[in-house]
Image (cartoon, grey):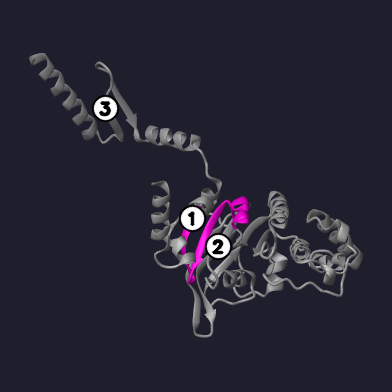
Amino acid sequence: MAEETKKTKAGKKSAAKNTKSGKDEISGYGSGSVDVVMSVDQVAAEAALIAESAPKIPELEALTSGEAFVSLNNLRAGYGKMEILHDFNLRIGKGQSLCLIGPNGAGKTTLFALISGFLKPDSGAVTFNGAAITGQRPHQICHKGLVRTFQVVQPFAGLTVRENIAVGAHTRVAGRAAALAAAGEIAQMVGMGAQLDQSAGDLTIAGRKRLELARALATGPKLLLLDEVMAGLNATEIADLVAVVRKIRDSGVTIFLIEHVMQAVMSLSDYTYVLNHGAMIAEGQPSQVTKDPNVIEAYLGHGAAKRLLAMEATADA
């Protein structure tokens, strides 16, 4: 017993000595009588190795890293006295495929208008690829590589598919012949190669949607804002267009889409944001946000989340 007391006192003296010496050390006892002493630098190195070997989540890394491909800072905007977005913030990482969902009137299209220069914010800032673009005109932003599509597609009905796409190509190539050649390549990419010489006015809704996408793609975008490109399409047409957008994403273009078609959201989105009344109410993986009570109530009304839970409980009973 006396021997154990001596060892305990010796251990306490050793620990006290380390503390008084001012060394940045972490002391403990290993098996037997071997002391384990690690410097703070060693602990930091161990932690770094653990962090390095941990699984990475690309979309979250891009959102939390110091660099953002697009950064929206404290944006406020509206129409007249009606404020649509207030102190809105968002970061988009390069190479991501993000989706923005929310009920009608939530402010989604207004947000796209702000990013692409079709609407000036009342306050706040937008940066793209490291440069401020707040207040710049749409064609200036387009030349920088940020392009959008529109919900209501309006092709030049009197021109062919090839000529419509060439209008977009003119922003990056000089001369009619070069623009028409580029249009042919883009048409093949979006599955319109066989319709190049067809009048745009004769296209179906699905054809017009593809043409809208092709005209935007012809500008050579780095970031493509897609505003409900799947709206009005049937299941087969949606699946076909999802494959086209995925091909565009895989080519290196960053995608940010507004969409109500959940088939497209689930297939294309790495990370999803939910907007309601101009404010972000949820974000995360698509499968997660669709189960969020706030999201359910935004779409289905107050109390909807509780009603759905009650229905599920009844079905399971």
Q: Residues within 10 Å of mark 2 (few under 14, many from 20)?
A: many
164 to the left or right of 42: right
Tell me where residue 295 appears, x and y as whole percent: 46, 61
> Which residue type does callout 1 highlight?
Val
**Is 273 inside the magenta-drawn segment?**
yes
Which residue is under mark 2?
A: 101
Span of residues in magenta: 262-284
Disc 2 residue type?
Ile
- Residue 129 is at least partly visible in this image: no
Which is more toward the observer, 200 or 215?
A: 200
Mark 3 or mark 1, earlier in chain: 3
Element assignment for label 3: strand
**In this picture, is 49 found above or below 277?**
above
Q: Which residue is mark 3?
A: 28
The percent coordinates of residue 300 (x first, y second) are 47, 65
Q: Would you identify the image quadrant in which residue 172 lies?
A: bottom right
Question: Pointer 1: residues within 10 angstroms few (<14), some, or many (20+)?
Answer: many
* Mark found first going from the N terminus, 1 or 2: 2
Relative depth, front residue between 83 and 151: 151
Residue that extends furthest to the bottom in the rendered view of this protein: 80
Evaluate whether residue 31 shows in this view. Answer: yes
User: Tags 1 and 2 in contact by the CB under 8 Å rule?
Assistant: yes
Examine the structure image and report whether residue 199 is included in the region drawn in magenta. no
Q: Earlier in the sequence, mark 3 or mark 2?
A: 3
Residue 257 drawn at (x, y percent) = 62, 61
Residue 159, label in figure: none
At x 25%, y 16%, the residue is 32
**Mark number displayed over residue 289:** 1
Tag 2 secondary structure: strand
Mark 3: amino acid: Gly
Residue 197 in percent (x, y) is at 90, 64
